[in-house]
Amino acid sequence: MATKQEIENFMRTDFPQAKCTVEAVGAQSATVRHTVGFDELRPGGTVSGPVLMTVADCALYVAILGEIGIVALAVTTSLTINFMRKPSSTKDIIAKCTLLKVGKSLIVGEVSLYSEGYAKAVAHVVGTYSIPKFK
Amino acid sequence: MATKQEIENFMRTDFPQAKCTVEAVGAQSATVRHTVGFDELRPGGTVSGPVLMTVADCALYVAILGEIGIVALAVTTSLTINFMRKPSSTKDIIAKCTLLKVGKSLIVGEVSLYSEGYAKAVAHVVGTYSIPKFK
Amino acid sequence: MATKQEIENFMRTDFPQAKCTVEAVGAQSATVRHTVGFDELRPGGTVSGPVLMTVADCALYVAILGEIGIVALAVTTSLTINFMRKPSSTKDIIAKCTLLKVGKSLIVGEVSLYSEGYAKAVAHVVGTYSIPKFK
Amino acid sequence: MATKQEIENFMRTDFPQAKCTVEAVGAQSATVRHTVGFDELRPGGTVSGPVLMTVADCALYVAILGEIGIVALAVTTSLTINFMRKPSSTKDIIAKCTLLKVGKSLIVGEVSLYSEGYAKAVAHVVGTYSIPKFK
């Protein structure tokens, strides 16, 4: 298991490009935030799909690190996203992840993505991560 | 239908953040390239999953624009990616998209993603786009 | 909106092959049961994957009928299933569906599948249904 | 590797409920057939979605057996299906599977499903199988 602080330190040193910040982690779940600015937008004044996928992947990764400890080489093996509502162009994206299965080699989790302050999710993700054997 | 030049112009003005470039488009297919640099990498010396999803989404979008013309408001409704092999950290990502169904309101396509110069795909994507009704 | 009784009558007349029964429906959700017998099993003494997909699809359909009324021609457009734990060969499968988005033309829902009496889901499904326009 | 005959024998003894027959197998691919009758149909005179998922899963399984030999305990870990066209109610379903990755523990494949005699696929599937370690 890794704490919020340990995960933040790890993300800062190992994923300096990542823009998502950890809001909460623990109990097989995580909440992360991605600030929305020019880089995130697309025609129609909305957040681009790839940004939502990026935030979902980050939320999954943080939830997994929180559960199994700092494992840099955990890798996504599959991810399915359904886009449901148009995100606000002026609100941060908040991603809430819950792990559905924590196996020895595969972890499955789901993520609901929100424009901050709205009750209904803008997108829903299910993803699987593979955990290296030497763990 | 839109030509490679029209799509490039549209991407430059409407998606200035997009890093993918159009290599070929037409016949319900498209090939795009994404240059790999520092921003694309993650621990283990490989291209991050979200970058691959971004490139796949771009390839789908370009194939759709090539088929139905410049429709800025076409939006991804779902996307499933399977990560299969570790991408090279020193090769560009090449994405080849084929449209599987071009319906009036939904378009389905698949994308194979490659590290340039390698025969085996690093990831495979199936995605659906929704086309606005007023088209 | 359709009641449990209306949906049961409809399923019996229009889907006489369906083996799933409606346990509950309403509030954008549904619970259905599929009795497990010889036809459902596969080597290793477990319920086959296609049976789980069938039950999930039924749960989605029942939740949708409960929400929008009897619409025989609503059709699945996509479905993603993740198999997480080995189902019991001696317990019925219980599927609990929650609709995530009820749009005019597309409905998205998720389904958790259980071996009756167990707390942890054996599989998780996200599916989308398309609703015919004349509705 | 297993031959068409070995796979047919195995399916007959271990999966007596399966209705799909092997048309061809080898070179990391397989073609299977599912006869369409009353059990396969749904309102609107078409083949039900779960039947298509069942046939796709069978095609994946046969392609995998053809590649790695008779491994009864190989199990599906995830499957994504996109339904693209209405299948004919009077034609058999033909499923053509190609394996995209044959790893030590995970195999990824895609399947195109056809109403026999039609050129355009009625559905497209990507699935992953997990191979037990003792192999």
Image: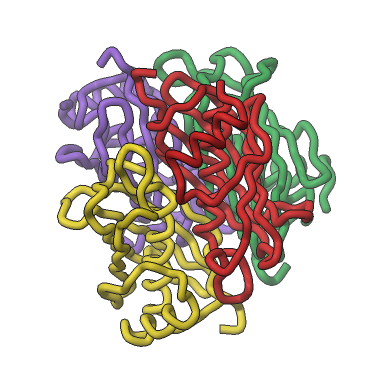
Chain colours: A purple, B green, C yellow, D red
Q: Is A4 displayed left or right of C62 in the figure? A: left
Q: Residue at x 49, y 28 (%)?
A: D107
Residue at x 40%, y 54% (from the top left corner) = C51
The reply to whether residue A92 is in sight is: yes
**From the image, which quarter does the C terminus of chain B lie in?**
bottom right
Residue D74 sits above or below residue B67 on the image: above
- Vertical placement of residue C32 versus A101, above or below: below
Residue at the spot x=38%, y=44% of the render?
C42
The x, y position of residue B83, in whole percent, is 50, 30
Where residue C107 appears, as percent x and y from the top left, is: 47, 67
| x, y percent for residue D103 | 49, 21
Q: Of A96 and D63, which appears nearest the observer?
A: D63
Q: Nearer the viewer, residue A117 or A65?
A: A65
Left or right of residue B40, residue A67 in this image:
left
Q: Please tell me whether residue B134 is drawn above or below residue A47 in the rendered image.
A: below
Q: Position of residue D119 (x, y in %)?
A: 78, 52
